[in-house]
Image (cartoon, rainbow, N blue to C red):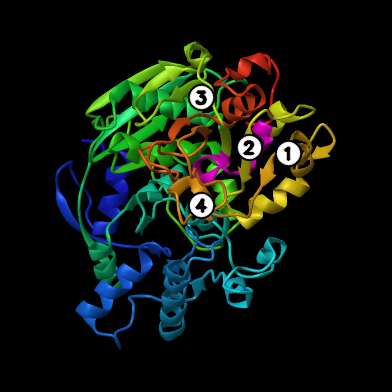
Amino acid sequence: MGMTITEKILAAKAGKSQVAPGQNIWCNVDILMTHDICGPGTIGVFEERFGRDAKVFDPARVVIIPDHYIFTADDKSHRNVDILRDFARRQGIKHFYDPDFIKSGVGGMPPIYADYNQTSYRGVCHCALPQNGHVRPGELLLGTDSHTCTHGAFGEFATGIGNTDAGFVMGTGKLWLKTPSSIKFVFHGPMPAYLMAKDLILHVIGEISTEGATYMAMEFAGDSIRSLNVDERMTICNMAIEAGGKNGIIEPDDVTLGYVRARTSEPFEVFASDPDARYARVIEFDTSKLEPTVAKPHSPDLRAKARDLADVKIQRSYIGSCTGGKTTDFIAAATVLAGRKVAVETFIVPATTEVDADLDNQKVGGKSLRQIFLEAGCKVGPASCAACLGGPVDTFGRANEPINVVATTNRNFPGRMGHKEAGVFLASPLTAAASAITGRITDPRDYISADKAVGLA
């Protein structure tokens, strides 16, 4: 009997020729990632169980990326980074992306944001990992963040784990995992110019609910998926967890391999699902029939069509995060915002320093993305998670009052972006940009035609 790509990867990491859904196996871990929110707790577990003088399983395969609460005067946030910095130094961690500009801040505040890209700081872990060559097809990547499933976009098994499990992996390089069953989502046909990956995944979550794929692998396939670039594939896999998925995954192709080989020389093995692989369900979509989609407060599965929410007023538009702050996301937003003015506060937050540089390097209509955003009246912040996880009250873009926000982030739970009564509407960068112009939820088809390419493929 054939296996899915998820089953093949786990079988390889367990040293077995075959595994089946529900089977528990010991797996060898290729990469363990942690950040400033969960890193101190993971380190605490590791040192309690293995000893303060114990060494991690491989200092080259533990990657530490502070990213969540960086640009703040909050002392506890800075303390967390200090804990990571001390641990990385003692352990000889080879990949610690240190936001060392914090140390040179005045009065506890970081220095001018323009200085931050001169350090080893990289920005949001989920986007920084592949950009810096830590993500490869066929590998097993675990991270202390539920959106670690992002990296299934590169044909690897990637999932989030808790501090206790991460502390064990940190010491042993292994973890006991249960093999998930798989659901296959097949999108047929080309992508219309007014749709983005965010629309596809919000449609899926609305279709099956936030519990519809609990502890299952969500495999995405079809012509529409193959037409997407790496940025867009990451968006889809990132939100697998919002349907309860254990992991999201897309079989590697030339798009995947070209990206990965340009960023790492490490060897890797490519896996693909067998034609006779077993799936718990196969769900198919005609992409041409889908419309710009929004998730209403306060759950990612409260699906609605953007055009049906035209009466909903917003006070803020937020374009950023690991889900909506990549270069492709900003090209899309700039296509809508070029030559126009925003009617509400609009925040632009690049996911990484590489994306931040692209705001100057990438152009739409002869102008840089940054110039388009500034001329439109947007506020551009430093690369970070920023308001996606709320953060301290001085966090860039944080909702400190009960307002309506249209956001390209991945969650809209109460308090997710700050104030517990703020209403967060999840949407694509195209929809978020269109809504910023009108001050209400707006279908991007009002600003781009169905046959006008926006450079997303």
Q: Give the quarter of the image for residue 366.
A: top right
Q: Which residue is under mark 4?
A: 385
Residue with the most extreme bottom position: 53
Q: Amino acid at mark 3?
A: Ser
Coordinates of residue 103 in the picture (x, y in percent):
58, 77
Q: Are marks 1 and 2 in contact (CB under 8 Å)?
A: yes
Coordinates of residue 337 in the picture (x, y in percent):
72, 29
Q: Specify the principal SS of the magenta part.
A: helix
- Give the magenta range: 319-333
Q: Secondary structure at mark 2?
A: strand
Q: Amino acid at mark 1?
A: Phe
Closer to the chain start, of discs 4 and 3, is: 3
Q: CA distance from mark 4 to mark 2?
A: 16 Å
Depth check: give the residue in front, 265 or 330.
330
97 up-or-down from 379: above or below: below
Residue 254 visible somewhere in the drawing = no
Coordinates of residue 25 in the picture (x, y in percent):
17, 55
Q: Which residue is under mark 2?
A: 346
